[in-house]
């Protein structure tokens, strides 16, 4: 997310919402939940990147052309509120993780750091970092089972 923490948070929140919405459909089929969640996060980041590229600076467009006005998608306010509440609940459950699990999890999924960089930064082995992230993911998966999307 080009070092933008706000964009990274938005991407993580969006990815978690998409995961909740799709988990009930995929629950019996999933073989590797970590890979599935990573792919969702990757796709969300790519969507954000593409969306950002769609908008050009007015100085780059010749004066003879007029910019098309994007038609905003109307999302009902109640759905927006529910999505925000879910995002806050996800964030609260991430912050409820023990610090030794939360720190590598956030470094991996919020900051997009590699396992090697996390290991170096925390002075742990690469295997230990992977195990801590796996444990955090497992705890979150169990704690968020009650949040499955029902709409």
Image (cartoon, grey):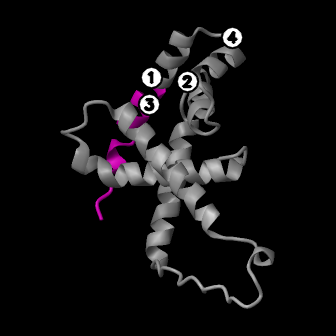
Please tell me whether mark 3 sits on a helix, a strand or a loop.
Answer: helix
Q: Residue furthest top?
A: 125
Query: Please, is residue 130 above or below residue 68 in the view?
Result: above
Q: Quadrant of residue 76?
A: bottom left
Tell me where the magenta segment starts and ends, as one range: 134-151
Q: Nearer the viewer, mark 1 or mark 4?
A: 4
Query: Which disc is residue 135 wearing?
Result: 1
How far apart marks 1 and 2 lie (CA) works out to 7 Å
| Label 1 close to label 3 by CB (< 8 Å) | yes
Query: Badge 2, how many Cα within 10 Å: few under 14, some, many 20+?
Result: many
- From the viewer's side, name the closer residue of 36 and 67: 67
Closer to the chain start, of discs 1 and 2, is 2
Taking the spot 59% from the left edge, 55% from the top edge, the residue there is 49
Marks 2 and 1: in contact by CB < 8 Å?
yes
In three-dimensional space, the C-alpha distance between marks 4 and 3, rounded to whole angstroms, equals 21 Å
Residue 71 vs 42, above or below: the answer is: below
Between the residue at mark 4 and the residue at mark 2, the CA separation in whole angstroms equals 14 Å
Between the C-alphas of marks 2 and 3, the distance is: 9 Å
Numbered mark located on residue 123 in the image: 4
| In the image: residue 146, left or right of residue 92 | left
The label shown at residue 137 is 3
Q: Nearer the viewer, residue 146 or 126?
A: 126
Tell me, yes or no, whether the two marked residues, 4 and 2, touch with CB atoms within 8 Å. Answer: no
């Amino acid at each position: 997310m080009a070092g933008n923490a706000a964009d990274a948070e938005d991407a993580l929140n969006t990815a978690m919402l998409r995961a909740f919405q799709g988990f009930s459909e995929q629950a019996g089929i999933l073989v590797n939940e970590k890979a599935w969640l990573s792919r969702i996060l990757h796709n969300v980041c790519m969507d954000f990147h593409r969306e950002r590229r769609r908008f050009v600076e007015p100085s780059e467009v010749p004066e003879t052309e007029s910019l098309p006005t994007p038609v905003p998608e109307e999302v009902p306010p109640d759905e927006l509120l529910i999505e925000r509440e879910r995002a806050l609940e996800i964030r609260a459950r991430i912050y409820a993780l023990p610090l030794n699990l939360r720190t590598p999890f956030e470094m991996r999924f919020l900051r997009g750091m590699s396992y090697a960089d996390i290991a170096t930064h925390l002075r742990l082995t690469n295997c230990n970092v992977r195990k801590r992230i796996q444990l955090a993911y497992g705890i979150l998966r169990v704690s968020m089972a009650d949040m499955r999307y029902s709409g």
